[in-house]
Image (cartoon, rainbow, N blue to C red):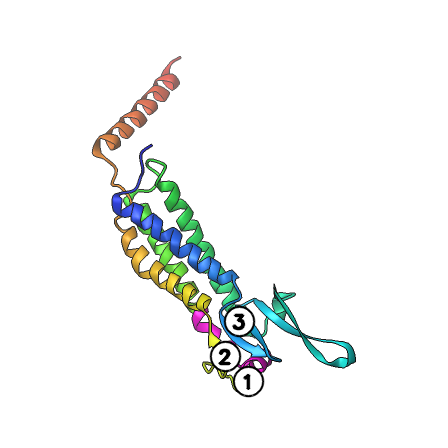
Amino acid sequence: MRSSLTLVGTLWAFLSLVTAVASSTSYFLPYWLFGSQLGKPVSFSTFRRCNYPVRGEGHSLIMVEECGRYASFSAIPSLAWQMCTVVTGAGCALLLLVALAAVLGCCMEELISRMTGRCMGAAQFVGGLLISSGCALYPLGWNSPEIMQTCGNVSNQFRLGTCRLGWAYYCAGGGAAAAMLICTWLSCFAGRNPKPVMLAESIMRNTNSYSMELDHCLKP
């Protein structure tokens, strides 16, 4: 089974898969931001949260220690986080699609040409740019009441207060940066140039096919 990728292309396919999985996994895990509330650790992503307060008996607040997503898109604490959810999700989807095509290119001949590889690299750049934009939007939501309650009531935009950024935030940003800088560059050398012999054979087959069709049409 012959690959349509060069040796550099094989490395590109592997790194594309790694960056796509890293960014997408970080997107879904609620470990972008860590804080505490009512003496319990609390963590957030853009659309998920671990540990949240509810009203107990006697109207006192108690912490429910479980992870889950917000009940609806509008329940996400801030507009910035809603925008972050959309653009980061779109970027992750784009990186995953390119990574899937790149992996298939390792197993299928003539799937990815030199020009196709470059187009896929451009798509990776756009995907990484979208995820990076989401990471840049994320601090704009730190002034929402829900986040301030978790960060000692002193957080604000681009100011964490008593909270700290989690490993998933850095992983998402690192995956986006690798996709934009490394994978985009490697994609320029990923696909194989079509061989002249194969190109000539393809032209001859098409010419013969057209000639047969023309002869068939001219026959009485």
Residue most extreme to the front: 39
Q: Badge 3 is on which residue?
A: 81
Magenta stretch, main secondary structure class: helix
The disc at residue 163 is 2
Q: Badge 1 is on which residue?
A: 152
Badge 2 vs badge 3, beta-carbon distance below 8 Å: no
Direction from residue 54 to residue 110 in the image, left or right: left
Residue type, label 1 = Gly
Direction from residue 43 to residue 189 in the image, left or right: left
Under circle 1, the secondary element is: loop
Residue type, label 3 = Trp
Magenta stretch? 134-153
- Percent of width and height locating residue 101: 40, 45
- Percent of width and height locating residue 206: 32, 27
Q: State yes or no: residue 51 in magenta.
A: no
- Mark nearer the N terminus (1 vs 2): 1
Per the model, the C-alpha gap separating discs 1 and 3 is 20 Å
Residue depth check, mark 2 versus mark 3: number of the one nearer the observer: 2
- Mark nearer the N terminus (2 vs 3): 3
Direction from residue 40 to residue 114 in the image, left or right: left
Under circle 3, the secondary element is: helix
Kindly identify the residue that appears in the image at 31 percent across and 39 percent down.
Answer: 4
